[in-house]
Image: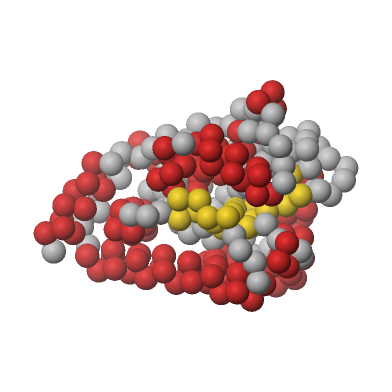
Amino acid sequence: MDAGIVTGYEVRFDFPHRVAAPELSYLFASVPRSGSTYVSHLLWRTGCLGAPLEYLNFEPVGPCGKAHGEPARQSAIWREALYRRTSPNGVFGLKAFPLQLESLQQENPQLVAEVMRLMLAGGRGSKVVQLKRRDRDAHAISYARAMLSGVWRKEQERGGRDEPEYSGQAVENALRLIEDQESAWESMYRDLGLTPLVLWFEDVLEDPRAATSSVADYIGAAIDPADIVEVPKIDRQSQKGAKAWAEARAKG
């Protein structure tokens, strides 16, 4: 993660430290560039739905990249998150992408098993909130541009990085990645016999309050306006490049 960027993983954003394990937990399942950062912070801001961030993202440039290649440190970070990122009402959320879990399975299978026991031990009663985007082309363009440019957040645009040249092949590759990862989630749901709550990014943008209420109802938590907490602001990235790519794709 680029230096100077406020990520939300900083200690100052922790909930009060708990001495007990979470009472309710849910998996926030998505794929990259679906709007999951915005939605995770929206849920977090309620102060009642945990802080569903990527506590298993140990990629070198990821938010927990300091533990890349160090299984013992990874496990310690995960266990620490359970006690400092569970909201006072006992709710813990974890945001994850299939590729993250697949990578971690290769590097630290014991941790993946530990995580799954907590997050999905309820089988059919396990709680999974999945975020999707209806506009597949816009999703794929966003994903392709981010992979080519290395710009994943608004703050990174200040570095003066060049806009990547349009690539239809990159968009098609991104579409396949999106489809493969969503298929991986679907396979997990079938194996566990569970039905997730599906949120559509476009709907969340239109009515954020309805989205947070639906998640609270689904997991069995109550939202109290008095519990709102400060979270890092998520600014939308410039859409100029994305629009240019969309026009180029439309031309074929």
Q: For the point 43% across and 39% down, which residue is it?
A: 205
Residue 6 at what x, y percent from top left? 54, 35
Q: Quadrant of residue 60?
A: bottom right
Residue 97 at what x, y percent from top left? 54, 61
Residue 118 at what x, y percent from top left? 77, 60
Q: Nearer the viewer, residue 50 or 244?
A: 50
Q: Nearer the viewer, residue 87 or 196?
A: 196
Q: Quadrant of residue 168?
A: bottom left
Q: For the point 48% across and 59% down, which residue is it?
A: 31
Q: Is residue 207 left or right of residue 188?
A: left
Q: Is residue 61 left or right of residue 223?
A: left
Is residue 203 at least partly visible in the picture?
Answer: yes
Is residue 84 at least partly visible in the picture?
Answer: no
117 shown above or below 155: below
Q: The C terminus lies in which quarter of the figure?
A: bottom left
Residue 229 at what x, y percent from top left? 65, 28
Q: For the point 61% across and 63% down, which residue is it?
A: 195
What colouring does the structure picture have?
A: secondary structure
Extreme residue toward the top, this view: 226
Q: For the point 23% across and 41% down, which residue is it?
A: 240
Q: Nearer the viewer, residue 201 or 17?
A: 201
